[in-house]
């Protein structure tokens, strides 16, 4: 883990997601908290990040600036439901999100390198 001393005896989830097909050019652009990163624009968006103070942190950032809308709009009614504001589950066509409308820090996508979406403790502006 990035900060083992601060996270001793805690459960952390450190994941990366890689598309198994050309998601950037799908007729139904991926969406949702993770899927909207595959929008074919070669721009990385970094949302608001919580600052750590003391031994306990209350999350308030919730990807603000990097996702369309607010986190509450991504909530579903049950564990296997697909019904949220930006759902594309039954769509036959849907354009990618409008990156120009996002307020997060925009960085160049690392072209030529493995393109993976995930969380990291450091912000690398390239």
Image: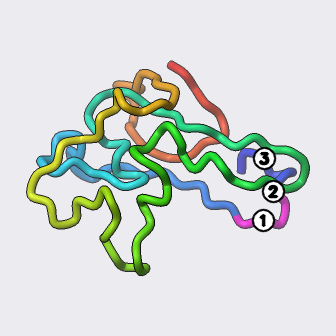
C-alpha distance separating marks 3 and 1: 11 Å
Bounds of the magenta segment: 7-11
Number of numbered discs visible in the structure rendering: 3
How far apart in space, not on screen, are marks 1 and 2 (Cα)? Answer: 5 Å
Side of 101 where 5 appears, left or right: right
Tell whether position 15 is magenta: no
Question: Which residue extends farthest right?
Answer: 54
The secondary structure that most of the magenta stretch takes on is loop
- Residue 74's quadrant in the figure? bottom left
Q: Residue at x 53, y 42 (%)?
A: 64
- Dot 3: what SS? loop
**How is the protein colored in the picture?**
rainbow
Do labels 1 and 2 touch, CB within 8 Å?
Answer: yes
Label 1 sits on residue = 10
* Residue drawn at the location 65% of the way across and 34% of the way down: 122
Disc on res. 53: none
- The percent position of residue 12, horizontal first and vertical second, equals 68, 61
> At 31% from the left edge and 71% from the top edge, which residue is drawn?
82
In the picture of the structure, the residue carrying the numbered disc 3 is 3
Choose the circle earlier in sequence order: 3 or 1.
3
- Left or right of residue 17: residue 52: right
Instruction: Pinpoint residue 9: horizontal percent, then vertical percent.
Output: 83, 66
Number of residues whose C-alpha sits closer than 10 Å to that of mark 2, classed few (under 14), some (14–19) or many (20 or more): few
Q: Which residue is the site of mark 2?
A: 7
Say left or right for 58 vs 114.
Answer: right
User: In the rendered image, which quarter is residue 11 located in?
Assistant: bottom right
Residue 61 pos. (x, y %)? 62, 46
Looking at the rendering, which quadrant does residue 76 occupy? bottom left
Q: Residues within 10 Å of mark 1 (few under 14, many from 20)?
A: few
Residue visible at 34% across and 27% down in the picture: 100
Q: Are marks 3 and 2 in contact (CB under 8 Å)?
A: yes
Looking at the image, residue 89 lies above or below residue 64: below
């Amino acid at each position: 883990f990035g900060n083992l001393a601060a996270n001793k005896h805690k459960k952390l989830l450190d994941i990366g997601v890689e598309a198994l097909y050309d998601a950037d050019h799908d007729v139904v652009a991926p969406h949702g908290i993770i899927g909207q990163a595959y929008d074919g624009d070669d721009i990385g968006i970094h949302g608001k990040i919580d600052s750590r103070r003391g031994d306990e942190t209350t999350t308030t950032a919730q990807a603000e600036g990097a996702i369309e809308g607010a986190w509450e709009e991504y909530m579903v009614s049950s564990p296997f439901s697909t019904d949220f504001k930006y759902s594309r589950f039954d769509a036959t066509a849907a354009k990618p999100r409008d990156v120009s409308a996002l307020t997060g820090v925009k960085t160049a996508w690392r072209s030529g390198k493995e393109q993976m979406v995930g969380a990291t403790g450091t912000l690398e502006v390239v």
